[in-house]
Amino acid sequence: MNYTIQRDIPLLRRFKMEKHFVRMAAALFLMAFSVAFTGCGGNDSSTSELGEPALEYNSGDTVMSDETEVLRSERSRELSPDVTDSDQRELVAGNNEFALDLYHTLRNQEGNLFYSPYSISLALAMTYAGARGETEQEMGTTCHFTLSRERLHPAFNALDTELAKRGGDAGGRDGSSDLNQADSFPGLSVGITEQDEEVVIIADEQDKGGVIITDELGREAEQDKEAGTSDEKGFRLNIANSVWGQSGYSFMPDFLDVLAENYGAGMRLLDFAGVPEDSRVVINDWISENTEGRIEDMIPRGTPLGPLVLTNAIYFNAAWESPFQEEITRDGDFHLTDGTDVTVPMMSRTGIVNYGEGGDYQAAELVYDGGEIAMLIILPDEGRFGAFENSLTAERLDEITEDLAFRSVAVRLPRFGYESETLSMGKTLSRMGMPAAFTWPGADFSGMDGMYDLFIGDILHRGFVSVDESGTEAAAATVVIMVGFAPSSQDVQEFTVNRPFIFFIRDISTDTILFTGRILNPVSR
């Protein structure tokens, strides 16, 4: 298998490194939610300890100008993966189990909670591609990766490709419909391109001409040159994956192939050892671009990086199918769990809604424009929030959604928003059952580099959500930092969300939970 080093000139030239100018092409992305509560070891050998050839590229003597070096497999992303319906259902079921397991691990923290289980699962799946032995077994059990390695990664690719079709001509919260995303795929980047052998050039924003969609491997698909020119933007459910490696470090070809074929992620080479702060800024800027500026400064200053960083970014922006009218929004009381009240802006609308209720809850599903994505709001009975939260499992969530039926409902929902700080997930995931991945000696990620030096230094997650009369905007990002040792009836039903509630933003067709949250206090930011 042959590999090439490509030099990508970015859309936005911002960061100048000591020897390299590093930037990225913008990529299509999906979204992720975060929780909202109250060095580098090089490998001098090109042959691994396992006896297989590892891929090494040494750019130490190379001076780049306005470019990011990219280590690419020759294999392209499989845009029509051959995955059975049963495999996709099994993947989604496992992802949703993980989403609820993570909820119960995080819920004991104070305050609001918001995260993207799908973003975290995707980032961990890319990491899992390089795990072996006990590390692989623990990660698989914790993440509910029940499919074999050969079926798991194509199943993620198929689900990603299916979700990329959502939206069509639907509207976004910030305007009218945008270009039809049914013709685009995750991991693609937008720009004017000129391809010459191994060099892909992404032109500056001021350049004119038709728009080309280019995936991480340089393959192109024409798009309407008028698409996306309006200030009004439409529905967006986008995902981006990228992998960042230490220049001069050796990586296994099979690992790069899995990332290229199933996640559209080429490995971008940075000098973590020589210019760690500039490398951090480059990754943060990529995350910011792929979340439309909602996730800024994701990796804190001083965070040890390298020799490998795996990133996922997800962004969602959609209008309600039936918007709330801003002129009838009124202040109202929201009852906190401690018995006190806060005043919040309560939005109101009456119409046909998918609604259900049980012995200790009410539930309503508010659909976004296009009818493919919805927010499921679960409102535990007064004084029962803690008991209901204890009882919430993936199976019970399925039962709640299956019992929903269309009826006329008067919905009153607080306008709310939340932006979390960067959350360290390492200890959380270790407690959930995968401690080996965070331990040296003990971690086995030899599938990445053929050695036994790498382990997960930390996993960072961060999210943003804003809900108003027009719709919802949400974004999240996940960063996996690999470090090396060596450094019914038609009466109107009342549904007044005036006390703590749990919500899920989910894809209706596949049942994929994209975001999960709870609101204990809508005015707490």
Image (cartoon, rainbow, N blue to C red):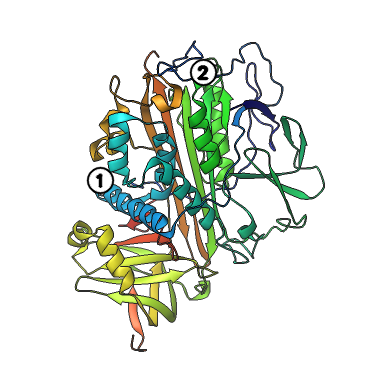
Marking on residue 105: 1
Q: Is residue 297 visible?
A: no
Check the image and report above or below for 440 versus 524: above
Picture coordinates of residue 442, whole percent (x, y) = 28, 23
Would residue 213 be found to the left or right of residue 387 on screen? Answer: right
462 vs 131, nearest the viewer: 131
Mark 1: which amino acid? Thr
Picture coordinates of residue 315, whole percent (x, y) = 52, 51
Would residue 195 be found to the left or right of residue 21 on screen? Answer: right
Picture coordinates of residue 395, whole percent (x, y) = 26, 61
Looking at the image, which residue is at 47% across and 57% down?
Answer: 466
Mark 2: which amino acid? Tyr
Marking on residue 249: 2
Using a 10 Å C-alpha cutoff, classify the residue at mark 2 as few (fewer than 14 neighbours), some (14 to 19) or many (20 or more): many
Check the image and report above or below for 398 versus 292: below
Picture coordinates of residue 304, whole percent (x, y) = 43, 22
Marking on residue 139: none
Under tag 2, what secondary structure?
Answer: loop
Nearest to viewer (mark 1 / mark 2)? 2
